[in-house]
Image (spheres, grey):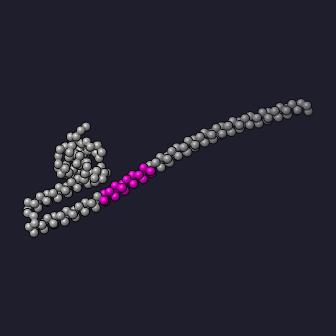
Amino acid sequence: MEENQPDGDSELQRQIDDLRARVDRNRADIDALESRADDAHQRADASDGRADEAHQRADASDARADEANRRADASENRSADDRLKIADLEARLDINEKILSELQIEGLIDRDHAVHLQEALRTSRMIGAAIGIVMASRKVSEVEAFAIISRASQNTNRKVRVLADEVVNTGDVSGLPTAGDGHGPGGPS
């Protein structure tokens, strides 16, 4: 029986070694799984960081869109105000022309004087339209728009009505000085 003992011990030793080998493999598998889990957590953290950055960019984009909408609304309001001013000027023009006709019919002014007054009204309308174009394109007040046209007139030694006529006919304000510089085409550099 003593001979069986060593065989039993060797069998037991073999089973222990086999269990140790399995435990070592399991530990290696667990270590590999923990490493993969750590990698997955790092990737998830990086993805969360990218998502946060995307949200920040989206928020910034929303803020820019809101600002653009605010500016568009303000521009629409200015345009509506400009349309009201134009309608008012047209109504005044009609009244002025009727008054001139009545004065001429009644003999209070002669034909030459009426023609001169009508030309003055036409010039005034043209200057007003040019002021409106400058206001819309440069986003300036009526006073600033007139100052720009006046400066251009002085800088180029041309009459305001001639410049106004060009602005109205072309819509081009690029040759006019800016609101604050005092310089324009033909002026000091």
In the rendered image of this protein, does residue 181 appear above or below residue 113? above
Question: Hey, which quadrant is residue 73 in on the image?
Answer: bottom left
In the rendered image of this protein, does residue 154 appear above or below residue 22? below
Q: Is residue 172 visible?
A: no
Question: Hey, which quadrant is residue 12 in on the image?
Answer: top right
Would residue 96 be found to the left or right of residue 85 on screen?
A: left
Residue 24 sits inside the magenta stretch: no
Would residue 65 be found to the left or right of residue 7 on screen?
A: left
Q: Which residue is drawn at the image coordinates 10% and 69% (left, top)? A: 106
Magenta stretch prevailing secondary structure: helix
Q: Is residue 12 visible?
A: yes
Q: Which residue is drawn at the image coordinates 21% and 40% (left, top)? A: 186
Q: Residue furthest right?
A: 1
Q: Residue furthest front?
A: 108
Q: Position of residue 131 (x, y in %)?
A: 25, 53
Q: Which residue is drawn at the image coordinates 55% and 41% (left, top)? A: 46
| Magenta stretch, residue numbers | 62-81
In the rendered image of this protein, does residue 125 appear above or below residue 188? below
Q: Position of residue 114 (x, y in %)?
A: 11, 61
Residue 78 sits inside the magenta stretch: yes
Q: Nearer the viewer, residue 119 or 59?
A: 119
Q: Nearer the viewer, residue 149 or 17?
A: 149
